[in-house]
Amino acid sequence: MNKGMLYIISGPSGSGKDTVLNEVFKRCPELKFSISVITRPMREGETADGKYRFISKAEFEEMIEKDQLLEHNEYVGNYYGTPRKFVEDCLNAGKDVMIEVDVNGARQIREKVPEAVSIFVCPPSFEVLKKRLTDRGTDGPEAVRQRLTESVGEIKKAIDYDYIVINDDLNEAVENTVSIIKASKLKSERNTALINGIVNQ
């Protein structure tokens, strides 16, 4: 049995990454999602069984000490990280896992799991990115400006990823992401057992 595949997906605020990912999971129901652990307070609309597991800073620091995280970062005084055990258990059981993470976390994971397939979701242009952030209506002009600066900084790191998916048309972006997932499973190094089984008979 082959080990499962590990996929990393990143994208700046305004890229539509979460929307793309939600549709990908509908089309790839066998794909497992890695839930992150975080120490910030739960926000309105979030639940304990959502995309984050909320823990204390003491618990998080214990996980760091015990090397139980594939990656972790600190942002405005809060910790964010990816638990190692769930990911490794899934991969060893032959199950594929998707990790949604920022560019810094993705770099850490690639260093530890170089065979991971990394995908960066990118807006089609700066103008579209700015419009999406502005149209949300949740941030004032200064906050939008800061998010734009952060997003552009993340987009600069897109070249480090295996694939870039341009999210101009949602359906096309989803199809391209699913195609990457399917194609990665057809790589020759993933099918050496099959090849050897045919050749050796």
Image (cartoon, rainbow, N blue to C red):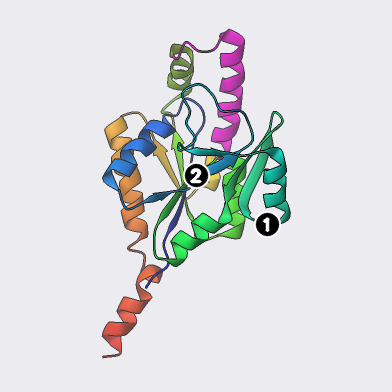
Q: Secondary structure at mark 1?
A: loop
* Disc ID at residue 67: 1
Q: Position of residue 20 (x, y in %)?
A: 36, 35
Let me know if residue 102 appears in the view. Answer: no
Quick check: 199 above or below 104? below
Badge 1 amino acid: Asp
Quadrant of the rendering where the C terminus is positioned: bottom left
C-alpha span from label 2 to label 1: 17 Å
User: Where residue 61 sits in the image (x, y, percent)?
Assistant: 72, 46
Q: Residue at x 45, y 38 (%)?
A: 49
**Coordinates of residue 107 in the picture (x, y in percent):** 60, 48
Look at mark 2 in the image and give the residue it sits on.
35
Q: Is residue 59 magenta?
A: no
SS at circle 2? loop
Earlier-in-chain disc, 2 versus 1: 2
Mark 1 surroundings: few (<14), some (14-19) or many (≥20) residues within 10 A: few
Which range of residues does the magenta coloring cover?
136-157
Quarter of the N terminus within the rendering: bottom left
